[in-house]
Image: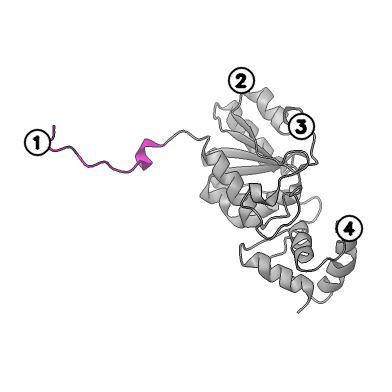
Amino acid sequence: MTLIDRAADQLRATGAAFTRRNLFHAARRFARGPADFERFVEGPLARRLRRGPIAGLIEPPPPGRPQRLTREHAAYFPAAILIVDRSELVDLFAASGVLVQSRLAVVSADGTPATVVRWLVRGIRAGFRAPVGYLHDASTVLYPFSIEPLRTLVEVAKAPIDFIDLGLPPGGLAAAELPFCPACDEPITELEVPPPAAIIAYAARRLAKLLPRDEWLLPLRPRRSRRSA
């Protein structure tokens, strides 16, 4: 079993899918391989993929293939919207199943998938609202309201949008500051350093805290007896 296969096994133990950057960082935790992501992709990963696919590894979709929305998308608006700073993370969230479980819509800061962005714009124009989170690496310095599609959503809403920055701060975070990666011994500066399930759960839970309470989901309280009244 190669180092890459061992790293893939470790990632699959916490989630069904992972990106190439997830695999790169997991492999480096096993052994100090290439420190450069591109060298890893063009070298060890390319040699491993010539032997066959790696279960769970998300491959980029063919260029030019539009994403189609299901009929269900026309029937509801998401409970929350998450913007990520790389399109690969959109695929990671989609593969996790959290989009359906948490009624979460995920789009990239580059405006993809365009079909999802158009769906969100139509819903906001129709009067629907949802809190927005922005998940990004420590090196991302773009001011969030100046990037797409957040700028478009704000302009269409013509009103303040409930927004939360979920990104890593400049310089990153020490592994001890977040329960993301117990095996990490360096500051976390990239979202794909920790196991994918940790980042997905972190973003979904933080956004869920912005949602109004649903009274129908509160636990039933025992009725007070007449004697205690």
Mark 3 or mark 2, which is nearer the start of the sequence? 3
Q: Which of marks 1 and 2 is in front?
A: 1
Alpha carbon distance from label 1 to label 3: 61 Å
Between circles 4 and 3, the one closer to the viewer is: 4
Q: CB of mark 1 within 8 Å of CB of mark 4?
A: no
Report x, y in % for residue 109.
Answer: 75, 39
Vertical placement of 74 versus 64: above or below?
above
Q: Residue 38 carries which label?
A: 4
Residue 211 covered by magenta stretch: no
Q: Quadrant of the C terminus?
A: top left
Q: Main secondary structure of the magenta part?
A: loop
Question: Disc 2, disc 3: CB below 8 Å?
Answer: no
From the viewer's perspective, is the residue at label 2 or at label 4 nearer? 4
Q: In this view, does 209 lie to the left or right of 16?
A: left
Instruction: Compute the Cα span from label 2 to label 4.
Output: 42 Å
Residue 147: image x %, image y %? 76, 32
Q: Quadrant of residue 145?
A: top right
Range of residues picked out in magenta: 214-229
- Does the magenta run of residues contain 227? yes
Q: In this view, does 98 lie above or below 28?
A: above
Q: Which of 116 and 46 is in front in this view?
A: 46
Q: Give SS at disc 4.
A: helix
Q: Splitting the image into 4 quarters, where does residue 60 fall?
A: bottom right
Say which amino acid is labelled 3: Ile
Residue that mark 1 sits on: 227
Q: Is residue 59 above or below residue 54?
A: above
Gap between marks 4 and 3 measured at Cα = 26 Å
- Residue 157 picture quarter: top right
